[in-house]
Amino acid sequence: MTPGDLQRLRVSRGWREHRVEVFHDTSVGSVLVKGQRPTRAAWRYQVLNGFARAAGLPLLRAAPAQGGALAQQIEVRRLEELRAAGVRVPEVLHVEADFFVQRWLGETRLDTLLQRADDEALRWWQVGLRVLVDLHARDQYLSQAFARNFIASGDALAMIDFEDDPLQVMTLHQAQARDWLAYLHSSARALGGREFNAGQSPAQLLRKELSQEREPVRKLVADTARRLAWALRLPAHRGGRGWQRHVSILQSVLRLALSAGTINGDSTLTSEALHARHH
């Protein structure tokens, strides 16, 4: 980037007021400037992590998202590590004390693509599943593997948002299993109850792609789903608000995860079977 580019970014009020700002006409093309998030209190994460420990659900532990300069350092480091490992993430172009600059990937998010009324929604969802398998095979992991943080670029998906590092509170395999749960949590409800002409259901696609994952990660996903199966008995409504909405999302995830197939040749644990077991 030229000195003129950088001076223009430094004096802009956009990213200072809104934390992010896109510039389309720099010497290196379109870039995104990202300022620092305000520092966050640690007690929120401590409460959630205490619940996760008490419930025996390590994948629900929250990585500290502390904001400020530390969060920026973590994000820049993780972006550079992931890119070096061959994972599609934005290229870091410049770093300063209170902001950094990354290449802009576009604005077509996966959560938007999942709202499509045709089989393209299911195809893009499978692309996301394959992204997880591929990056985990590279011994990598995401931070917030939600559909909104997957950006379509051509026929591929790239990932954004790395202000926390899950390895601060969990193992690599746990962080990778956490990616699966976050991805399902942010996408299962969008696909639930829909008819597709692709010849395979979301559960079948999940079973197919998850079978390519490493065994310890598959076991962690399955174990977490089993431990949360009691939530299938809670009252919920797809169109509900507040806690009912969150329960409905969780139930969509559980039904999809529990119907995803076998672990090491064990019999399939469907949501219906587990629901009956809890009665």
Image: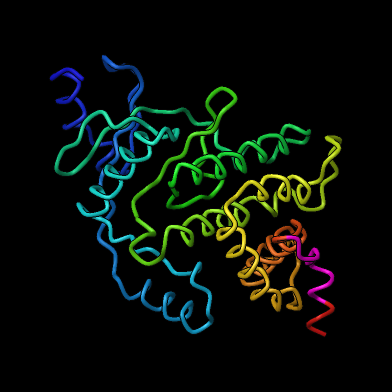
Drawn side of residue 194 relative to residue 113, left or right: right
Residues 184 and 83: in front is 83
Drawn side of residue 174 relative to residue 147, left or right: left
Q: In this picture, is 17 found above or below 93?
A: below
Please provide the residue range marked out in magenta: 265-275
Q: Give the total of numbered labels.
A: 0
The part of the image, by quadrant, that contains residue 184 is: bottom right
Residue displayed at 76% across by 67% down: 237
Residue 83: image location, x then y, percent: 37, 34
Residue displayed at 70% across by 61% down: 263
Drawn side of residue 227 relative to residue 173, left or right: right
Q: In this picture, is 100 found above or below 63?
A: above
Residue 104: image location, x then y, percent: 39, 28
Tell which residue pokes out farthest to the top in this image: 27
Residues 86 and 197: in front is 86
Residue 213: image location, x then y, percent: 60, 49
Q: In this picture, is 19 found above or below 58?
A: above
Residues 240 and 124: in front is 124
| Scheme of colours in the image | rainbow
Specify whether residue 33 is painted magenta: no
The part of the image, by quadrant, that contains residue 94 is: top left
Q: Quadrant of the C terminus?
A: bottom right
Residue 206: image location, x then y, percent: 71, 49
Q: Quadrant of the N terminus?
A: top left
Drawn side of residue 40 relative to residue 62, left or right: left
Tell which residue pokes out farthest to the front in this image: 265
